[in-house]
Image (cartoon, rainbow, N blue to C red):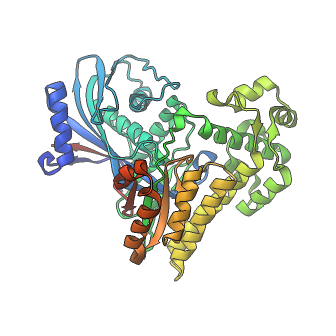
């Protein structure tokens, strides 16, 4: 695999979407784009809410992506426009300190996260002017990483516009870090698969150090993505960061119970490493140390020997200061169990037993149950959709992405693909006029592994 994102020659006239993007760019700015950048969305097959806890995940890139046309100039401004008219234009000066309003997570602030990340990485005092038009085919707020793909695309654009060079791994790490400017404390899966994906394969993404390993999926099944049509914007709500915080507190509580140095440990995976324990032993430790009832702030402070002020500044994030109770046992139980399921999923894919498809389906079903019951990141519509998918012929179905809305991913035996799609269409989408109107972009088969982020030029 090439170290840096490739820059490919492309014939614009042969691609209707690129041609439309170029035409819009020329009408808007009165010049042709200098280059284009593309970053894919992703579907996470298994391993939900564990990347920010330090554990491996198993996503694959999808065909849907973010595409940006760019010109570089001396205007002293970054001009951003979107092919979708519901997303308004935005212009910002090329200043040393780009301001990102985390209380107002508009589309252009995600783009500016990527710009700011590259600017800070290279210490660029004054960015060149840029004119950009963005086009996206990833359904927004659907759990398919539309926001992270936009950040990655912007990072790639800014790197190229400033004539800099970075490896795919470095870009992934920068984009994971800079997306936190919008307030989301993610773990890096989305950015990593956007840059490290390869066609025809899923990837096991591991962290510290970041690396990606091919995972060959079984030939006898397809993965179908279905959107429950409930939107969930991670940055616009506190659901996501509350879970990050609960895992951080659980880390401290487990470390305290075993006499470890609390100051160094922030992730549940770090406690396991420090104890040199198996995931099964960590699950037993959770049962031993953490009670199932929610913990109050006062109880946590007393057990960790910290003040209420320390609790707020050291453990909570800006949008979780209102929290008074925390479900530590359930969150830690999900994380360690899900981490084990990821490894089991890869083992089945590698060893290819005769019953591979059923085994993988069972793991996906266990994952959804854990997300629903222990992590509480599902919603009634997602649970209904997952149930319909299983009744319609899927061997496994689970929410994918942050949850609280968005998409399910289902593993369907290849011979049942058409009947499955029809059954889901009839049971979930057609009875509801709003869902029926969204059905074409909400229910689709995902080919194994879309391509990674690339630069394009004529």
Give x and y (percent) for residue 68: 28, 38
Quarter of the image where the N terminus is located = bottom left
**In the foreground, 212 or 134:** 134
Residue 281: name its quadrant: bottom right
Camera sees residue 171: no
In the rendered image, the residue lying farthest to the left is: 13
Residue ID at (31%, 35%): 157
Left or right: 372 with respect to 306? Answer: left
Q: Position of residue 60 (x, y in %)?
A: 43, 57
Q: Is residue 140 left or right of residue 15?
A: right
Tell me what residue is drawn at x 37 percent, y 59 percent.
444
Estimate the x, y position of residue 416 in percent, counting from the top left. Answer: 42, 75
User: Which is nearer the eye, 383 or 118?
Assistant: 383
| Residue 284 seen in render | yes
Q: In what quadrant of the picture does the C terminus appear?
A: top left
Q: Nearer the viewer, residue 274 or 35?
A: 35
Which residue sits at x=53%, y=47%? Answer: 405
């Amino acid at each position: 695999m090439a170290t840096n994102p490739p820059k490919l020659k492309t014939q614009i006239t042969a691609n209707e979407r690129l041609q439309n993007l170029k035409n819009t760019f020329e009408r808007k700015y009165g010049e042709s784009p200098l280059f284009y950048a593309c970053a894919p969305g992703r579907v996470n097959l298994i391993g939900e809410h564990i990347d920010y806890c330090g554990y491996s995940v198993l996503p694959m890139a999808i065909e849907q992506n973010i595409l940006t046309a760019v010109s570089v100039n001396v205007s002293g401004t970054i001009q951003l426009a979107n092919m979708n008219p519901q997303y308004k234009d935005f212009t910002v000066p090329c200043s040393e300190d780009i301001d990102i309003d985390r209380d107002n997570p508009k589309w252009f602030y995600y783009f500016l996260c990527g710009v700011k990340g590259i600017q800070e990485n290279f210490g660029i005092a004054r960015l060149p002017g840029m004119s950009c038009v963005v086009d996206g085919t990833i359904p927004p707020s659907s759990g398919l990483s539309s926001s992270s793909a936009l950040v990655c695309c912007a990072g790639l654009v800014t790197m190229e516009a400033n004539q800099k060079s970075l490896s795919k791994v470095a870009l992934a790490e920068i984009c994971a870090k800079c997306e936190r400017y919008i307030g989301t404390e993610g773990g890096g899966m989305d950015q990593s698969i956007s840059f490290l994906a390869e066609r025809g394969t899923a990837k096991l993404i591991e962290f510290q150090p970041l690396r990606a390993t091919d995972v060959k999926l079984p030939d006898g099944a397809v993965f179908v993505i279905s959107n429950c049509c409930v939107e969930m914007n991670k940055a616009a709500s506190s659901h996501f960061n509350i879970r990050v915080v609960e895992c951080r507190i659980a880390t401290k509580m487990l470390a305290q119970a075993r006499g470890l140095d609390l100051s160094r440990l922030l992730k549940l995976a770090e406690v396991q490493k420090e104890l040199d324990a198996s995931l099964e032993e960590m699950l037993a430790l959770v049962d031993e140390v953490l009670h199932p009832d929610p913990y109050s702030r006062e109880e946590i402070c007393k057990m960790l020997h910290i003040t209420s002020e320390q609790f707020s500044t050291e453990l909570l994030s800006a949008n979780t200061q209102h929290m008074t109770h925390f479900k530590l046992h359930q969150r830690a139980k999900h994380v360690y169990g899900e981490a084990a399921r990821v490894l089991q999923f890869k083992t089945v894919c590698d060893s290819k037993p005769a019953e591979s498809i059923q085994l993988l389906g069972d793991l996906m079903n266990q994952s959804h149950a854990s997300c629903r019951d222990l992590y509480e990141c599902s919603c009634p519509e997602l649970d209904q959709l997952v149930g319909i998918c299983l009744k319609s012929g899927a061997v496994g179905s689970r929410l994918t992405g942050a949850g609280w809305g968005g998409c399910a991913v289902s593993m369907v035996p290849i011979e049942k693909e058409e009947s499955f799609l029809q059954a889901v269409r009839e049971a979930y989408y057609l009875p509801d006029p709003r869902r029926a109107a969204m059905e074409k972009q909400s229910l689709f088969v995902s080919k194994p592994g879309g391509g990674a982020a690339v630069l394009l030029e004529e």
